[in-house]
Image (cartoon, coloured by chain):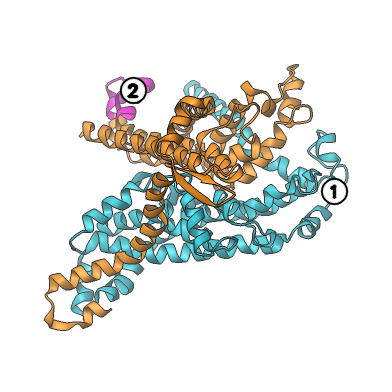
Chain colours: A orange, B cyan
Amino acid sequence: MSAARTGPSLTLKTREAISGWLFVSPILAGFLIFFVGPLIAVFYYSTTEWNLLSQQSSFVGMDNYVDALTRNDTFWHVLGNSLIFAAGLVPLNMALALGLALALSKPMRGVVIFRTVFFAPVITSAVAWAIIWTFLLQHESGAVNQALSLVGIDGPNWLHEPRWAMASVIVTRVLKTVGLNMILYIAALQSIPRDYEEAARLEGANGWEIFRRITWPLLAPTTLVIMVITVVGSLKVFDHIYLMTGGGPQNATLVLAFYIYEQGFKFFNTGYASALAVVLFVLILALTILQMLLKAVRK
Amino acid sequence: MNYRLQQKITRICWVVGLAALAIPFVFPFIWMLSGALKGQADVFASASLIPQTIHWSNFSEVFSYQPFARQYFNSLYIAVIVTTLTLFLSSMAGYALARLRFAGSALVLLLLISALMMPEEVTIIPNFFLMRELGLMNTHMPLILLPLFGSQGVMATFLMRQFFLALPKELEEAGRMDGLSRFGVYFKVALPLSKPALSAVGIITFLFSWNLFLEPLVFVNDIKLFTLPLALANFTDTYGLPLWHLQLAATALAVIPMLIVYILAQRQIVESFALSGVKG
């Protein structure tokens, strides 16, 4: 390393500083070029309108935003869909993850098999998972409706009826991702000292009391992390939508991340798509700041 | 005796409940395998999981329908490159941020952390124009560069930093005494000690790259350059014919090796993810 070879002419402190910058510079340089730069650029693009024929852009100020917020109903519909998606996915995912973790955090026979099973979709490609579930949710011939018909229920056309399509995408996405949250909860549960529970039992506390007064409060930091990861994850959902519904039927599953892709790369509304990306940026930034505030309040 | 009986019944109830809950997690894999072996007409025609006649030819047809072997290889080599580069660059940066004192390091860390949660959808449009300017459209470079320097690379750097913070300093000092340079200490002392962290970051990075979908969709349009996720989505309507049986056979070919690796290295894989969440 050159820093080491410069010899005694440099102080130890300077040499350490040079090494430090050399060590971080490869990732930092790439990060500035492929992340920070584009992040700044997306703000700029969001104030432009692109002429596809002449391949030129012109400055239009806040027009894309005004367009989204006032003239275009789709934007509010899409934003609403993203929030519905998150509001459906996050509680379902977290409750199921916690339940599974509580059931599977203690050593007992078969526990590893169950953990393996619930985690398997996490390592499976989302594309594969979405493809298989698209088959399972077919109207007449899908396995889900065939199973339902065994108990006399005439199942809906899951992915082609507006009110069922969203629910279907949410549930299949939960199945895909819940294993990760389950593992995070199991890790947290296993770090809680056993003595707490034993002491509480000696005092005569029942399972529910132990959970409510000991386990749940001790899980709070983990719950916060999981919540942020899951909310952000739900806002960036793309592959499930792309493969299972394409945003339909009647835009019922058109969510923000998919809408950005559609506007940007299908309809080439670059300025408008950039404005949508800025909206997504602001949403996620707000969530991250909220998380930091909540953490600070705890301390 | 009565108490033990009661306990046994409770346990059986738990297992039955969990088994019922496991159905939507397991059944898709079983159904995929069954569908992959059925004829085109059979996939939906018969509800039975056992194919009437087993069509092993589906698997070979997958390879003639599109350059599937090549697409498979694309995914594999891209994931290997991304993982190797990420391990190297992120451990180096993580090491410096944890161990070296230099002006501006706090700022660098803050900058990186602020990107931890940003999804690629936010920057995909400017990155599209950037890649076009650089002449990298329809190449694999964006699929390597963007994960390496995007939120995934940042996450790797952050995880490595957390690990190096917890590593005892004495060992490094011994290395310094022996006349190793900073880089020598990092490479010969710190890195060999950080195998658990490296394997965790490696596993997560590999899976992330392997499953990447939006970037290949945006940057690649030559079928020979497709990666697996893109290839799987490509069996639906190229000729307007839905080739369900082939799509399922291809999906099985993509999913099963990963499942086998997962079952074999389960403990390590699961722990990697646990680590990422606790630290992230």
Quick one: SS at disc 2? helix
- The x, y position of residue B117, in whole percent, is 39, 44
- The x, y position of residue B226, in whole percent, is 64, 58
Kindly give the residue lying farthest to the right in the view shown: B53
Q: Residues within 10 Å of mark 1 (few under 14, many from 20)?
A: some
**Figure check: A272 above or below B262:** above
**Figure check: A288 above or below B262:** above
**Figure check: A265 above or below A70:** below
Residue occupied by mark 1: B54
Span colored in magenta: A199-217
Residue nearest the viewer, comparing A44 with A37? A44
Q: Disc 1 is attached to a residue of which chain?
A: B
- The x, y position of residue A187, in whole percent, is 39, 42
- The x, y position of residue A30, in whole percent, is 39, 61
**Would you say residue A210 sits in the magenta stretch?**
yes
Tell me the number on the disc at residue B120. none
Residue at x 47%, y 30% (from the top left corner): A68
